Image (cartoon, coloured by chain):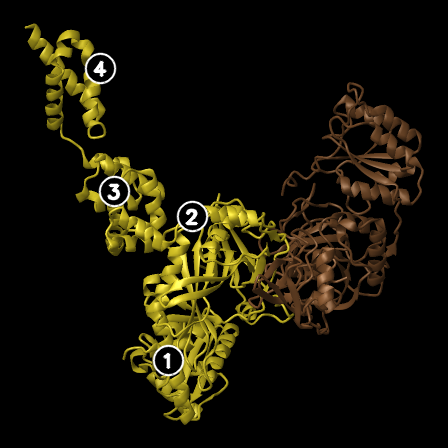
Chain colours: A brown, B yellow
Amino acid sequence: MEFENYSPRVRAALRDAGARPGDMVELIRDGSTHRGIVLPRPLIGGDPGSIVIKLDNGYNIGVKWSAQMKLKRISGGRALEVFPSVSLQPKPGLPEISLVSTGGTIGSRVDYETGGVKWLMEPGQVFFMAPELQELVSVRHVAVPFLVGSENMSAFHWKEVARSVAKELNSGVSGAVVTHGTDTMHYSSSAVSFMLRNLSKPVVFTGAQRSTDRGSSDASMNLLCAAIVAGRSPIAEVCLVMHGSMEDTHCLIHRGTRVRKMHTSRRDAFRSINELPIGRVWPDGRMQIDGRHAERSDSEVQLDAVFEEKVALLKFYPGMEPEIIDFLVDRGFKGILIEVTALGHVATDESQRNLLPHLSRAIEEGVVLAAAPQTLYGRTDPWVYSEGRKVQDIGVIYCGDMLPETAYVKLGWVLGHDPGPEEARKMMLSNYAGEISAVSDPRAFLT
Amino acid sequence: MTFDHRSAGLKCGIEIHQRLDTHKLFCGCSSALEEEVPAMEVKRKLRAVAGELGEVDRAALHEYLRDRVFLYNAYHGETCLVELDEEPPSPLNEEALDIGLEICLLFSAWTPDEIHVMRKTVVDGSNTGGFQRTCVIGLDGEMEGPRGRLSVPAICLEEEAAGIGGQKDGSVVYKLDRLGIPLVEVATGLLEGYSPQEVQEIAHRIGMIVRMTGKVLRGIGTIRQDVNVSVRGGARVEIKGFQEIGRLAELIEKEAQRQISLVRMKDEFAKRSPKVADPVDVTSFFADVMKGPIHSAVKKGGVVLCLELAAFAGMLRCELCPGRTFGRELADHARAYGLGGIIHTDEDLEAMGLAGNFARLRAHLGAGKDDALLIMAGERGVLERAMKAVKERADLASRGLPEETREPNPDCTTNYKRPLPGSSRMYPETDIPPIPISKERLERLRAKLPEKPEKKRARLVEAGMSEDLADQMVRDANLPLFESVMSKVKVDATLVANMLVNSFRSLRRTGVDVDSLTEDQVVQFFEQLSAGTIVKQEIESVLAEMAQGKRPLKEIVAERHRITEDDLRRIVEAVLAEKSQLLAERGERSFAPIMGEVMKQVRGKIDGALVGMVLKQLMDAKLRAKRS
């Protein structure tokens, strides 16, 4: 319903006047008249009892509705928002890519009338942000498996993206770009990293930290750079390409399993953790590839889209109630990724809230427990302090320098294969997509 | 010829922008503009975005075509991630809103029950986000004008844009310290039938009313006017960012003249058959030019393009208003693309050493004596776009006037800046929820509303100020400063008004930046003045020294009252004579109280150590004399 965010009384008044969004109306009260285009109310904030009108000068105001007022519909039907669109002209000789659009800021746009956010449904609406794309790559196909904000995603969506990407890659394009909401983009890039086996081409996640309605949106450069990496780079891995600094100069190419959103709002929020980015890319097409990466080949990509959803990501904190572990076990969880302190600790027998018996019980009941560092930087090591040894001794898998979010996604994927405990341990500690390494790069801290 | 606004059909509209004295509108940063050295420089681009109805806005597109990189300087304490467009805005500054609502009440405007912050698309780079945040807080206001009541249709609260700090590597450098300072914009309706002088008076009155709140910033740039001007047969032109309110009439008159001349030019063209050809590459005709802008452009790999303007001869040197020819007008359009300018056949080509080149070019193109030729040199891509813009403007000359945005020059003429933006470029700021305004809030503000200018004037006259000075004080930008001084220092109102109005004016004329003095400094000044440490003859010289900002007032005053060692000796002798009894009773132990007495008279005027030495010497002498 178009007027759904109004109070029932206002809705009734609008209905009685026969007004629809975009109609010119007059609000008359105490002899003064306010004339404007009546608009839907924004979802959040303000007074649902105020009618929002757009004045001739372009400003919106809210006029509080009361029974003493009159509402008159003057004329109707100004068409509201039409999103602009361009059609790209495919150029022969340019590398072909596919675009998988999943939602998020980069795939949405503020409705200029209401301020509400709407999905960009047509490929041309997405390309409007960066028409230069057609000089750099040729977009063969746009797949839209779903449109959803990344905070609302789950394993279902990761599997869908992986499936969609595999299909596109095996159709013969040079690479794929996945446009995605940024909040959980690093979970998705990790998940797709594990779910695509025998990956032979670039899969590039990108998004936007600034909304696409504004001239300063980072969406354009991110999209261009992502397309360049997808179409032209030699990197046969799942990567994430976003702004490299607060400037509109270049983007960084991060490995999909080694990247994390480290700021709520900055353009350069995404950072490689525990390794340097694979490289950098400029919107004019230049690339500089520094880091190790898998090379392109012609082989077919295999889809291994499984995920055990009964897996939890749990952060240990001082004073944590051990019952939380019991709860998860009792609820039938098959795996728990614990974010441990520093080298790999939780409260043990010196504490009144000793976690050890509860962790032991979990393992006895067949739950796979794994640990990754809540410091994000550095690697776990159970041998330095006795607390660590105790945790390791009961059978918790120490994930080394894997990021907690990556380790969580990996645990779900590993358990999706229904392995035994030993196989699960072996898989967790094997390197599938650059997510774990034995070497700590001294340059890779807070960069 | 005197300008007759009635026969010209002059129509104006003014918008006054006044900065408010509070922190920034959408973050906690200071509005002080004190930091000199940027802490950071950030390089950004802006892109053309869709307008409200899905088209790319005309002005937005224009700026986009310029393919510019913007450099933003950030300053500690005065910029944060909000100005850098790296963080959503904080909730709207409630203090700024209160000041704004107070101004609405002073104009008897109606405040909407709910305020909606909007994004107004601005892509000249002056806002990092590509839009300015603004909200309408008052509607249907009115004020007393030179001919009775006139309407003030809209009052807005908005954020200030970033200021231009220069150019670097072909990019504009913007200073983010200014971005986000709260501004109140007061707009008049269409002013028809008013003379330029009357429009200036209206602007003056608006400024005066806004200042009544006492909560506005003062000094250079803190208040400025946008003015819309059109004449019969002309077009709506918006002149943005004019700061010298006392010369507003001159600005309006010159713009009106420019438009009248362009209308006449159009009529003249109707008698000719003007035609503007497409630009052609004529680089080879200037191969022998070995100096100047053509040479340096060609040396860098650039080209020379020529526009043949059939039947334009003489038109390019036609003066539109004093100091502005039509040629200059065309050159503005090239400058908008960062090009130096144009050379044309209405100029003294002999003096430029280009007469031969143009003669050959004329022969080659088969151009006659009634035709004008215009050339520009530069890098081909930019040059072609700039030439296109110049051609479009030249084409228009025979048809009418373009609506455009112009910027003022120091001589009150204006330069073309960009096409007038379309009206559909405002949409909701989704990061700030609508703000309901309660009746109680408005009542609370109404209860402590400052007195109106007329009333204030009357009160000053009642307190003994002359009618004339009271009038000037109330109209002066420093009225809030006057109020502040009067509330803090016990000092004669006429003296303060005289200084803030007259002394400040004469100092400004001699180039002294008195408006840079802070409120605290001015208050201190009057404290010293009323304490007698500054004498009347020194007022202006002390102010001038303060404005230089090199030394605190205390030092300035102290130095002016330095005494010599001889003076000191006389003072010490006098005190010793006065305290002879104390000296006799307590001997050397009387040093401290006597020293205190001396210091009372000489503190700040001479080195304290010297005072001690001299006193000891003279005291010893007296004691010795007594003993012997």
Q: Nearer the viewer, mark 1 or mark 3?
A: 3
Q: Is residue B516 left or right of residue A240?
A: left
Quote the CA–CA distance across marks 2 and 3. Answer: 23 Å
Can you tell which mark lies on residue B275?
Answer: none
* Chain of the residue under label 2: B
Quote the CA–CA distance across marks 1 and 4. Answer: 82 Å
**In this figure, which residue is indicated by the disc labeled 2?**
B215
User: Which residue is at a point 78% across and 18% down the rendered structure image?
Assistant: A350
Q: Is residue A3 visible?
A: no
SS category of the residue bearing label 1: helix
Q: Earlier in the sequence, mark 3 or mark 4?
A: 3
Q: Amino acid at mark 4?
A: Ala
Q: Is residue B171 above or below residue B327?
A: above
Q: Position of residue B467 (x, y in %)?
A: 25, 54
* Chain of the residue under label 4: B
Q: Is residue B172 above or below residue A444?
A: below
Callouts 3 and 4 in the same chain: yes
Q: Quadrant of the C terminus of chain A?
A: top right
Q: Earlier in the sequence, mark 1 or mark 4?
A: 1
SS category of the residue bearing label 4: helix
Can you tell which mark lies on residue B492?
Answer: 3
